[in-house]
Amino acid sequence: MNKTRLGYALLAAAVCGLFVFYWYLDASRGPGYQALSLETKEMMNRQGWSYHETLGVPGKPVGEIWFSAKSKTLTVKWMERGEFKIKEFGQAEYWYAVVACEKDDGDSFAVMFRKSK
């Protein structure tokens, strides 16, 4: 095998390896994270947020909105089968951000992110 073919083979192997690595990272974050748009995931990562948990039943979102607050607690609301659910996050150790996602059936879910203070 000449040097050019060997170089292309190594490059292809590296690209495949990176693809598998990023796929594994995305899959390990759960179905709520996977449902988010690529733009939202990239924005949250650029701003230093890391995935924390998903609240509610994830599905295909028809709309996404994100917010965070530098208060003592962050209150998150989502809807499951027409019933509102609420969870509070104390922000003593971490800052929290939420991406609230509405589904076309009227329910919603929330994808939580956090970063150290």
Image (spheres, rainbow, N blue to C red):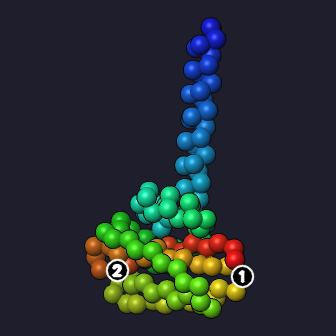
Would you name the residue on which mark 1 appears?
93
* Residue nearest the observer in this picture, 17 or 70: 70
Quick one: quadrant of the N terminus? top right
* Residue 67, position as x, y percentages in the image: 48, 78
Q: Is residue 52 left or right of residue 84?
A: right
Q: Disc 1 vs disc 2: Cβ atoms closer than 8 Å?
A: no
* Residue nearest the observer in this picture, 100 or 72: 72
Q: Residue at x 54, y 49 (%)?
A: 23
- Of the residues under marks 1 and 2, which one precedes in the sequence? 1
Q: Given the image, on which type of amino acid does mark 1 rest?
A: Glu
In the rendered image, the vertical position of residue 23 relative to residue 62, given as above or below: above
Would you name the residue on which mark 2 appears?
107
Quick one: quadrant of the C terminus? bottom right
Q: CA distance from mark 1 to mark 2?
A: 31 Å
* Residue 51, position as x, y percentages in the image: 58, 67
| SS for dot 2 | loop
Q: Crowding near pointer 1: few (<14 within 10 Å), some, many (20+)? A: few
Q: Residue at x 59, y 54 (%)?
A: 25
Q: Given the image, on which type of amino acid does mark 2 rest?
A: Asp
User: Which quadrant of the figure has residue 100?
Assistant: bottom left
In the rendered image, the vertical position of residue 84 relative to residue 56, given as above or below: below
Q: Residue at x 52, y 80 (%)?
A: 68
* Residue 16, position as x, y percentages in the image: 56, 35
User: Which quadrant of the figure has residue 88?
Assistant: bottom right
Q: Is residue 31 visible?
A: no
Q: Is residue 117 left or right of residue 46?
A: right
* Residue 10, position as x, y percentages in the image: 63, 24
* Residue nearest the observer in this picture, 4 or 20: 4
